[in-house]
Each structure stands twice: as structure tokens, then as C-alpha cells.
Image (cartoon, helix red, strand yellow):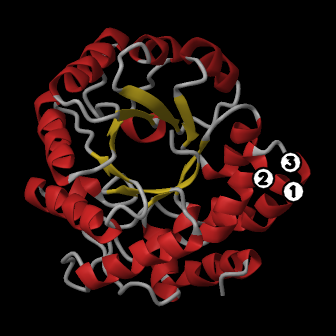
Amino acid sequence: MIRGSIVALITPMDSEGAVDDEALSRLVELHIESGTAAIVAVGTTGESATLDFDEHCAVIARTVGLASGRIPVIAGTGANSTREAIELTRCAAQAGADAALLVTPYYNKPTQEGLYLHHRAIADAVAIPQILYNVPGRTACDMLPETTIRLSEIDNIVGLKDATGDLGRVARLREGCGDGFALYSGDDATACEFILLGGDGVISVTANVAPASMQAMCNAALAGERAQAQTINAALEGLHRDLFAQSNPIPVKWAVAEMGYCKEGIRLPLTWLPEELHARVRAAMEQAGVL
């Protein structure tokens, strides 16, 4: 089980929107040096929605190659088509990813039974360890704890990223899924408390900007050191808030570029962070001690 701060890595791009392999290499090294527990490649923060199928697979393979076994790589392979999700998950397995992260199907609003059958079909088709991802604020689909508990009985479904921000779910999920099933927060603002309540870590946007601090917070929370975890987290609260001043990953890509790790590149329909928000995000970065 991977425990701690898992970065939902941006996909760096140049001004024309092409994937920037050199910047990707810098980012992978940054997270290895910072002690980040694992990397998610081509998740929501990695602009999975605007990469075509071949690019998606190529970025996963490139990230696995750059990591070279030094840090686990979890590949974002979810789709609202079960067949497409299976093919993306096969690509991840063939590339050597350590696990796959599968968002609930978006837009088409499946039932709870549909969600169960969707994830079971992917797990049956591809043996790679799989982490469920529930983010109803983006998908218009909420996978209820009861469905997660059913899916946790499948051998290669090994965890859940819960981005609901509903801390009341943690105890129910832990009880129903058991200690061997990983529970990750997908909401930076409540991640510290999520871990203190029994979670195993966070799949984090903030970790793109403050990777060492996020890992330190997670380490303290995992050790049950509430006061220390909350003290570290207090300095990160501005990032937790202001990296969502516009749709993710707009603010975080600007922040990573401001730190000098990537160029100003993003794909339509997303746009670059407007100047009137620069001071706000910069102040949060200064509070966190990364500028």
C-alpha cells in the first residue's frame, strides 16, 4: 500500500499546447527529491480530458520511464466509456505503471449498479491494481460508500480516492472496506483531518507546489501527531484554497510555471490564469514558503 502524499501531477506543455518532455523530467525529479510517496500521471490535474488516446498512453509511459522504479507511478485511466477505460488501463499496465486510478464515468450518470459493473469489468479485463476515484463535483456522479465496499471485495481493486470532502464517510469506508484497502483524500482542504480519521494519504493538487510540506503533513497525520500535522497544514491552507481560484489545473499550472519548473502552456478549453489572480495565488505560495 502506498501511504502519504501522492501528487496529481500536471502535464507540462509549451505555449502551443504540446507536451513538454523536458519539464516532465524536471517535475519527476522534484518529487523524488521531495519525498513524495507516488505520482499520478494524466489524472484530472494532468489534463486527461484534453489529451488524445495516444498522447495519454505516451505520457504514462514517459512518466514510468523517468521514474525508473524510484517512485511509484499511478496512471489515470478512467473514462465514461467502459471499453475506453479498459484500453487505457491496458496501456498503463503495458507501460509498467504500478497502479491505475479510475474516475467514475462522467456526464452519462450511471446508476450504482452501473458503477459496480463498470469497475468490475475493468478489474476483470486488466490485472493491474486499481484505485477508484469519486469526484462528484466534476462527474455529476457520486459513488456511494456501499458501492465502494462491494468493489473492495475484488482482489485488484485496492483503494479509493474520495474527493467529496465528506469526512463522515471515512469511518464507514474503513469499517466496510477493511484495513488493507487504501483510502486517499482527493480534497486538499480536508486531507489532514481525513488522514487523522483513518485515511492512508492524499492524492493532491497542492503537492505540485509544496511537495515536501505535503509529505511532512501526511507523515505527521499518519503517525497520529495531530498538533504537528495541523501546524504544517496551516501554512498550506492558502494553497488548498487558492489553487482552486479557477478550475483545476489553471491555477496550479501557473504556480508551477512561477516556480520555474514549466512553461506557460495549457490546452483549450482551459485558459491561462488571468493577471488579476496572480497576486492571490502568489500570496498563498509565499505563505507556504515556496517563493
Residue 51 in sight from this viewpoint: no
N-term mark: 3 or 2: 2
The residue indicated by pointer 3 is 225
Q: CA distance from mark 1 to mark 2?
A: 6 Å
Element carrying mark 3: loop
Residue 98 in sight from this viewpoint: yes
Element carrying mark 1: helix
Check disc 1: other Cα within 10 Å, few if <14, some if 14-19, many if 20+. Answer: some
Q: Residue at the location (44% across, 85% down)?
A: 261
Kindly check if marks 1 and 2 are in contact, taking CB atoms under 8 A apart as contact: yes
Element carrying mark 2: helix
Q: Nearer the viewer, residue 255 or 195?
A: 195
Q: Which mark is residue 240?
A: none
Kindly check if marks 3 and 1 are in contact, taking CB atoms under 8 A apart as contact: yes
Counting from the top left corner in percent of width and height, residue 171 is at 69, 21
Q: Quadrant of the C terminus?
A: bottom right
- Residue type highlighted by circle 1: Gln
